[in-house]
Image (cartoon, grey):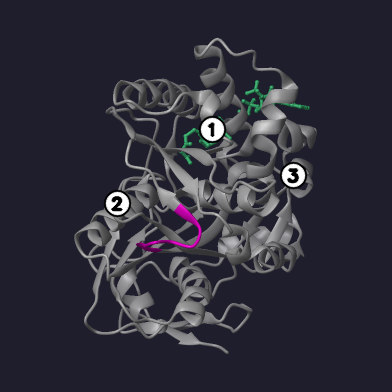
Amino acid sequence: MTVPIGIHDISMATGQYAMDLAELARRNDVDVNKYYIGLGQTTQTVPAADEDIVTMAAAAAKQIVAKHGVDGIRTVLFATESGIDQSKSAAIYVQDLIGLSSATRAVELKQACYGGTSALQLAAGIVARDPEQRVLVIASDIAKYDVDSSGESTQGAAAVAMLISANPNLAVIDETVGLYTAHVQDFWRPNYRSTPLVDGGLSVRAYLEAVEQAWKDYESRGGRSVTEFAGFCYHQPFTKMAYKAHTRLLELKGIDATEARLYADLSPTTIYNRAIGNSYTASLFVGLMSLLDHAEDLDGRSVALFSYGSGCVAELFSLTMVDGYREHLRTVENRAAIAHREPITYEKYRALREFALPEDGSDVTLDATSRSPFRLTSISGHSRIYEASH
Ligand code: CAA
């Protein structure tokens, strides 16, 4: 009998500040319901100047090692599309900050927002080969678009850390998956840019096409039918996208996509992302955490997850919840991470945007503003210096 492999623990972190989209609506002179209802977003996380993908990742991962220790963790897979270095993996900073053994494989993975799912599947493969090992998977991103662009309303930031192991406490990763890759220029960020180039309309169409194609592949490989799932989690660049995607799926299956059906299937998975905004690689897993923290008991039930990364790669996979999984959730901490963000005005957001680390990499010391357990303190000799703040 093969040993079940899956998510043993999952934790999250987000940034210091939250801007209500009413602030952006005021700036853009649009009806705020375009954001609240049209996109399904209420606030967006804005990181402090001394926060980045590493500080959020370490803050999420710290919760996992505090509970489970570091024994058996020999691999850290760090998925991101807002990397801080073209060569060195962000996983090494996390390995150091949270005190993992030097006998660790630490790497960074990239394929837009899909990277977290690739890390999860690679981790499952590593554990299948040696079930004594546990793999730390991290998805951490800051979604940042050009000021005054249409993507600005979908910005956000978060990190999710997951411990992948044999005989997991939370959920088993099911083996059947549906895959789809197509060369599409819907969203990309060339090396010389700090913000992406986006064809918004094309990106929505490409996402919906990927839903259809990934399901087709999933079904051709003997996957479950739509009606067998107790929950649906989608990558959420904005939460309304999950509604568009699920409508497409239900219609494809000849199921009436009524408002009541869509709301029942999706509303628990969108609560956290509505408040955080897009967190690229982390978004799907923030959606999963939102579902687990708000759904009725899913013991023994399966949840479908749809991962989409622009460019594009998509994967449909599923998790089967382990009996008693609810005892292992971090609902209080997750809600607190979101609720404890400090509200800021549009003007404060712009001031934070305008502050940028020197492009020539010259030395700089950052004010201590973040309440995160880890801070970026300075750039010195072209190196990023982090510290554990408490
Ligand atoms: N009340 C209620 N709804 C309103 C409204 C009002 N007063 N005013 C407008 N709306 C609705 C519109 O009808 C529209 O809804 P539908 O799409 O359901 O018709 C919605 O609000 C948004 O309106 P627009 O399309 O006019 O908005 P926009 O021009 O600002 O662009 C966007 C929206 C293209 C998503 C843009 O935010 C964008 O480019 N975002 C970045 C790219 C993105 O997120 N793409 C998603 C797929 S790609 C992906 O998933 C990868 C990733 O993470 C980036």
Q: Amino acid at mark 1?
A: Phe
Q: Earlier in the sequence, mark 2 or mark 1?
A: 2
Q: Nearer the viewer, residue 183 or 269?
A: 269
Q: Which residue is mark 3?
A: 27
Q: Amino acid at mark 2?
A: Asn
Q: Of the residues tagged 1 and 3, which is closer to the observer? A: 1
Disc number placed over residue 290 in the picture, else none: none
Please provide percent x and percent y for residue 126.
23, 60
Q: Quarter-wise, where is residue 309 in the image?
A: top left
Mark 3 vs ligand 1: CB under 8 Å? no
Q: Of the residues tagged 3 and 2, which is closer to the observer? A: 2
**Range of magenta residues:** 164-171
Q: Of the residues tagged 2 and 1, which is closer to the observer? A: 1
Q: Earlier in the sequence, mark 3 or mark 2?
A: 3
Within 10 Å of the Cα at label 3, are there few (<14), some (14-19), or many (20+) other Cα atoms? few
For residue 388, side relative to residue 270 (left or right) = left
Q: Earlier in the sequence, mark 1 or mark 3?
A: 3
Please provide percent x and percent y for residue 288.
55, 49
Within 10 Å of the Cα at label 1, are there few (<14), some (14-19), or many (20+) other Cα atoms? some
Q: Secondary structure at mark 2?
A: loop
Q: Is residue 265 above or below residue 55?
A: above
Please provide percent x and percent y for residue 96.
35, 83
Q: Which residue is mark 2?
A: 191
Within 10 Å of the Cα at label 2, are there few (<14), some (14-19), or many (20+) other Cα atoms? few
Disc number placed over residue 229 in the picture, else none: 1
Question: In the picture, which quadrant includes the C terminus?
Answer: bottom right
CA gap between label 2 and label 1 equals 40 Å
For residue 21, side relative to residue 230 (left or right) = right
User: Which residue ends up furthest to the bottom in the rendered image?
Assistant: 390
Q: Nearer the viewer, residue 161 or 141?
A: 161
Ligand 1 appears in which quadrant? Answer: top right
CA gap between label 1 and label 3 equals 42 Å
